[in-house]
Image: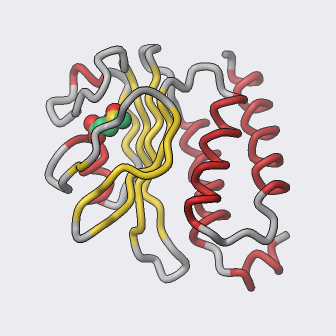
Amino acid sequence: MNKTEKEQAYTAALAEIKAVLQGESQMVLKMSTINCILKSHLPYYFWVGFYCMHEGALIVGPYQGTLGCLHIGLDRGICGRAARLAQTQLIQDVHADPEHLACDSRTNSEIVLPVFDPQGQLIAVFDVDSTEKAAFDELDQEFLEQLLAEQFAQSALEKQFLS
Ligand code: SME
């Protein structure tokens, strides 16, 4: 996918997500819908899903793809690092990252983003994996950070004023 195609795909996906999730607040419903719509627009997505904070560690939440790891401690994996640092991790080659947890050996690159609630509390990380090398870049990061902020970090009041 070239830059323009990627931009168009994300713009369409985000608009669809916004329309479908209008007025919804239930977490599992929102996570499942985001996975489904993104995966149907972005052909290089191989695994897409959420790991949710639970008792100080991450547990697998709604996802689409092959079997994911069930539990990830904050000291393990790129997901653990994204949660620990509360920062997006953009990984061009997962095999070159010693912290990477290989749930499926076909994964070659990934992006993991922290997910915050309106109080700024870390509630989950959003993990997207690709079999392509260096599939993700700043464009993915920009669109996904915007989506996660809109869907999980903005309060209902903020949404009303920003839409
Ligand atoms: N990408 C992760 C592990 C989760 S799976 O790939 C679904 C990591 O290294 O944290």
Find residue 122 and report its horizontal and vertical position in percent.
39, 69
Find residue 25 and report its horizontal and vertical position in percent.
67, 72
Q: At x 73% / y 69%, what residue is drawn?
A: 24
Q: How many marks?
A: 0
Q: Which quadrant does ligand 1 occupy?
A: top left
On the picture, is 118 further left or further right than 9? left
Query: How has the structure been colored for display?
Result: secondary structure
Q: At x 79% / y 40%, what residue is drawn?
A: 11
Find residue 157 and report its horizontal and vertical position in percent.
74, 85
Q: Is residue 97 above or below residue 23?
A: above
Q: Is residue 55 above or below residue 72?
A: below
Q: At x 82% / y 48%, what residue is drawn?
A: 15
On the picture, is 46 further left or further right than 112? right
Q: Quadrant of residue 107?
A: top left
Q: Is residue 56 above or below residue 15?
A: below
Between residues 148 and 67, which one lies in front from this camera angle?
67
Q: At x 76% / y 50%, what residue is drawn?
A: 17
**Which quadrant, please, contains the N terminus?**
top right
